[in-house]
Image (cartoon, rainbow, N blue to C red):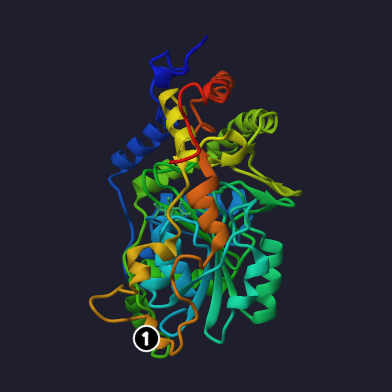
Amino acid sequence: MNKCAILGGKPVREEPIPWMSTMGKEESEAVLDVMKSGVLSSFLANSGDQFLGGPRVRQIEEDFCKRFGSKHAISVNSATTALHTAVAACGIGPGDEVLVSPYTMVASASAILMNCAVPIFVDIDPDTYTINPDEIEKWITPHTKAILTVNIFGLPSNLPRIMDIAKKHNLFVIEDNAQSPGATINGSEAGTIADIGVFSLNYHKIIHSGEGGIILTNNDELARMCQLIRNHGEVALDEENDMEAVVLGNNIRMSELHAAVGIEQLKKLDHFLSERRILAQKIDKGLNERIGLKAAYVPKGYTHSYYVYPIQFDAEKWGISRGAFARAMEKEGFPLGVGYVKPIYLMNLYKHKRVFNQTTYPFKFIEKPTQDYKKGLCPVVEAMHYEKLLTADICRYPFKENDIDDFFTAIDKIWEERKDIGLTIKE
Ligand SMILES: Cc1ncc(COP(=O)(O)O)c(C=O)c1O
């Protein structure tokens, strides 16, 4: 019998999981052109023409507007700073609350704290892993100013319902679309459906420039605020002699080098997406044919970008624990993510409400806390994180369909031999 690698047999996949660059000669030549021009950045923090940066920065913004059908794009140096800027542009600050998913990369929530507002965590839908619209209204208080919804793993949030709720309560909606460029709802691009949307160009995103971020909005006022916050806006406003307008800016500008790379990567986005979607279809089919492994759910009218592929593991059906399954898969050459980022409200910073030095700032601005950041707050997130969710990073270049075949060979091997090799449901 073909013994599992755990017993010393040959693993299905012997090579390590590759991290292959998606950079081509186009990106190299674009960078070289910038170097030859000598203009590596062109921003100046005053109200003149250079306030909006140099030619590549303007080009990437124009290209994002065209590709995603947005009126404005503002390039910045990361999605983290983009989120911080988007929250600030909405006029959110001390005394305000923002509803956010607890199942996301920490930047989605820290952008709220960095503006001295308070994150309020809303449980997720167990199929989509995005904020559950049914859970939103119970957390809305007079302090609530916005919903920051995260399009996680490549799937857009339920934005049609979120936008309706926001309209009813007069809230801004911010889309953290770092993981889902090119995903759509009924043809509308994720990242452009809410008031303001954020994209990431960090090195492990679907397209990237090493580091970088893009903000999209159709709202002229929000766009102007983002441009000001990006580039020490207080200087420009003073020069314009606008004594009423106040803005605290920063330097979160994108360099010409990063913009040059991002321009070339954006041209390749649709190709990368179509490759990911071909692999995803094969993974969907394989999972649907097997017991105790739930495929990624894509609601009707939605498309997915498959930044990572989420799988739900049913320990009862397998008779072994999720951890044991993941360890066995790793031995077979297919490491899996066990859960995702720990539910954010369980991280020390939140649990102890200690953000800035020893004070209770910014929580002290709200007399009666709306939420206790403790275990049990969002049961669906906790079940996904601690019991069910696995993430597979095989839905990307350079994986090919035969790698997906091997992935399922490994799964089937573990299924067949799980009892023989002593895997149990106990961790
Ligand atoms: C959902 C989400 N939001 C924000 C970020 C932050 O992106 P960046 O690294 O560009 O700051 C990430 C990065 O992993 C992310 O996955």
Image point 51% across, 41% down: which residue?
390
Q: In terms of depth relative to the viewer, which is nearer, 339 or 195?
A: 339
Label 1 lies in ligand 1 vicinity (Cβ under 8 Å): no
In the figure, 240 relative to 407: above or below?
below
**Label 1: few (<14), some (14–19) or many (≥20) C-alpha neighbours in 10 Å:** some
Residue in front for this viewpoint, 70 or 169 = 169
Outermost residue, top side = 1
> Which residue shows up at 48% across the image and 26% down it?
398
- The front one of 303 and 284 is 284
The relative height of residue 153 versus residue 33 in the rendered view (above or below) is: below
What percent of the width, then of the height, locates residue 40? 30, 49
* 260 or 189, nearer to the observer: 189
* Relative horizontal placement of residue 400, taking residue 53 as reference (left or right): right
Above or below residue 209? Residue 282 is above
Say which element carries label 1: helix
> What residue sits 33% from the left and 35% below the top?
32
Residue 62 placement (x, y as % from top left): 53, 53
Three-letter residue code for mark 1? Lys
**Residue 273, visible in the rendered structure:** yes
Quarter of the image for residue 317 reads: top right
What residue is disc 1 on? 364
- The image shows residue 284 at horizontal and vertical percentages of 66, 33
**Vertical placement of residue 30 versus 235, above or below:** above
Q: Is residue 162 visible?
A: no
**Horizontally, is 16 left or right of 185 in the view?**
left
